[in-house]
Image (spheres, rainbow, N blue to C red):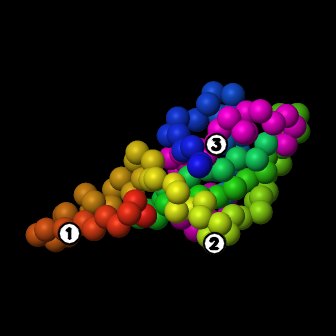
Amino acid sequence: MAKVSDTIPEALQLEVDAAINWFNAQSSDEFEVTGIVDAEDSLASSGEKELRLVLCGGDMCQQKKFNVLRTGESFTVSFADEPSLSNGTQAELDPPPGARKAWLDDAINKHKFVVLVFYRGFW
C-alpha cells in the first residue's frame, strides 16, 4: 500500500522544488506540493530520482510522477510513466492535510449550507 506523507524529507526538497517549478511552468494553474508518496523509495535511489507527488491547486488535487536528475547546480525534470487508474494506486491515497484547503471556505461563503459526502475514502 502506498505511504503518503505531507512532510517532504529535507534530502529531497531541492528535487521536489525543481519538479513543482517545472510543472507550474507548463500548467495554466498554480499548484503546490501537499504530499509525497513512498518518499523512502525516492531517497534510496541514487542518480535520477523518481518522485510521486500530490499536487493541489485551486479546488483540484492530483498525483503526478516525475523523473528528476541533478546535473550540477540545475535539474532535468520530466514526467515518469503515469500510473493507470486500473491498478488501484490512485484510490489507495488519502488526501493529505491541506488538500482542497480553500474549497470548503469558498463554498461556505457562497451558500447557506454545504453537504459533504464521503464514499469509502475516495476523494
Q: What residue type is labelled 1?
A: Val
Front-most of residues 77 and 51: 51
3D distance between C-alphas at marks 2 and 1: 29 Å
The residue located at (50%, 40%) in the rendering is: 6
Magenta region: 24-48
User: What residue does disc 1 label?
Assistant: 115
Whole-percent x and y of residue 9? 61, 31
Secondary structure under the numbered disc 1 in the rendered image = loop
Secondary structure under the numbered disc 3 in the rendered image = loop
**Pointer 2 with pointer 1, Cβ within 8 A:** no
The residue located at (25%, 57%) in the rendering is: 105
The residue located at (40%, 59%) in the rendering is: 121
Q: Is residue 32 rendered to the left or right of residue 24? A: left
3D distance between C-alphas at marks 3 and 1: 33 Å
Earlier in the chain: of badge 2 and badge 3, it is: 3
Q: How many tags in the picture? A: 3
In the rendering, which numbered label is found on residue 38?
3
Q: Can residue 14 be seen in this view?
A: no
Earlier in the chain: of badge 2 and badge 1, it is: 2
User: What residue does disc 2 label?
Assistant: 86
